[in-house]
Amino acid sequence: MADASLIGHRLPDVRAVVEPGRLRTFRRTIGAADPADPVAPPTYLFALEMLESDRPLAFVEELDVDMAAVLHSEQAFTYHAPVRAGDTILLQTIVSDVFEKKGGALVFVVQDTKATNQDGRHVADVRRTLVIRN
Amino acid sequence: MASTSERIGKPAGGRAPGGAAILRTFPPISRHVLALYCGASGDSNPIHVDLDYARAAGFPDVFAHGMLVMAYLGLALEEAGPRAGIRSLAVRFVAITQLNATITCEARVGEVGAETIALDLVARDEAGDVKLQGSAVVDRATWGERLGQA
């Protein structure tokens, strides 16, 4: 059951290499003009976490709810430095907020991820908001 | 304000009618596209590719990953201007994007500051229904000319 007791909960850290082949496949799939471009596109950090995690859906599973009841409500990226093929990115995620709407029929879970590269540079902040339909 | 039929099919780049600074239409989101995106993004949630699972969960069919449509918005932005100047990108998933939807991404100039320009973003399907709504902030120094705000 997802409730306010989840606030502050840390998801497992993910350390992910930005593999050139995976990046190329992603770019080709979304229709990029130059799939071989070595810079990660704006939403790639979201995919990177799932591509390289031992538990790709940990961010849903740890809510302890039926996965089919979970939808993506909001998503945000703030960029501080480029992410490139060959980088190793550390993704550290914490549940920063849980709140209800419609008398508990909808429960929103906000997860904040800090992305740091192999040089210790803070490259991006990622915010994912999920909604659980009870 | 251009009609939906006029908006669809315009290439990225250039100043489109109706005040859109960026306008780009993507191919229909087929089951094949969803299967490819499942593998390419690592998002293995079966609801996007497994019809039996989607029906058991109460949906009439599989539907698109919200993040696929957000990737389209990001690509429209990235390929329209200087990528290095993109500071942020944020969206709200307004409605489920149905199978075979043809998505058009649009950006309009919002608040113009001394150093940054805010862009209002929207992704619509072929019926004009809003699927994603959001915003981006870009550097005025690098994007100003592209957006007519030099």
Image (cartoon, coloured by chain):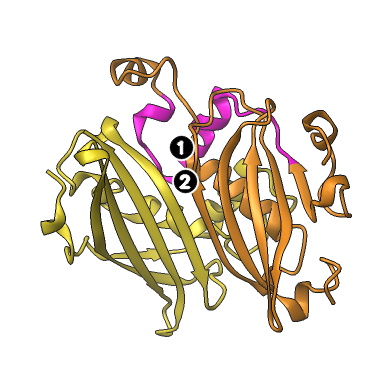
Which span of residues is magenta-colored? Answer: B25-49
Is residue B94 within the magenta segment?
no
Q: Is residue A18 visible?
A: yes
Q: Which image quarter holds the C terminus of chain B? A: bottom right
Q: Residue at x 14, y 51 (%)?
A: A3
Q: Is residue A55 visible?
A: no
Q: State the image coordinates of residue B41 (x, y, percent, origin top left).
A: 47, 46
Is A75 displayed left or right of A29 in the figure? left
Colour used to depict chain A in the structure image: yellow
- Indicate the amino acid at tag 2: Ser
- Indicate the amino acid at tag 1: Cys
Q: Which type of secondary structure does the marked residue at label 2 adopt? A: helix
Q: State the image coordinates of residue A132 (x, y, percent, origin top left).
A: 27, 39
Q: Quadrant of residue A70?
A: top left
Classed neighbour count for the residue bearing mark 2: other residues with Cα under 10 Å, few (<14), some (14–19), many (≥20): many
Classed neighbour count for the residue bearing mark 1: other residues with Cα under 10 Å, few (<14), some (14–19), many (≥20): many
In the rendered image, which residue does mark 2 sit on?
A: B41
Q: State the image coordinates of residue A124 (x, y, percent, origin top left).
A: 46, 72
Q: Residue at x 84, y 38 (%)?
A: B2
Q: Which type of secondary structure does the marked residue at label 1 adopt? A: helix
In the rendered image, which residue does mark 1 sit on?
A: B38
Subunit that carries the residue with mark 2: B
Q: Residue at x 48, y 31 (%)?
A: B96
Is residue B32 within the magenta segment?
yes
Is A82 displayed left or right of A50 in the figure? right
Subunit that carries the residue with mark 1: B
Is A101 displayed left or right of A23 in the figure? left
Chain letter tied to orange: B
Q: How many marks?
A: 2
Are the residues under badges 1 and 2 in a single subunit?
A: yes
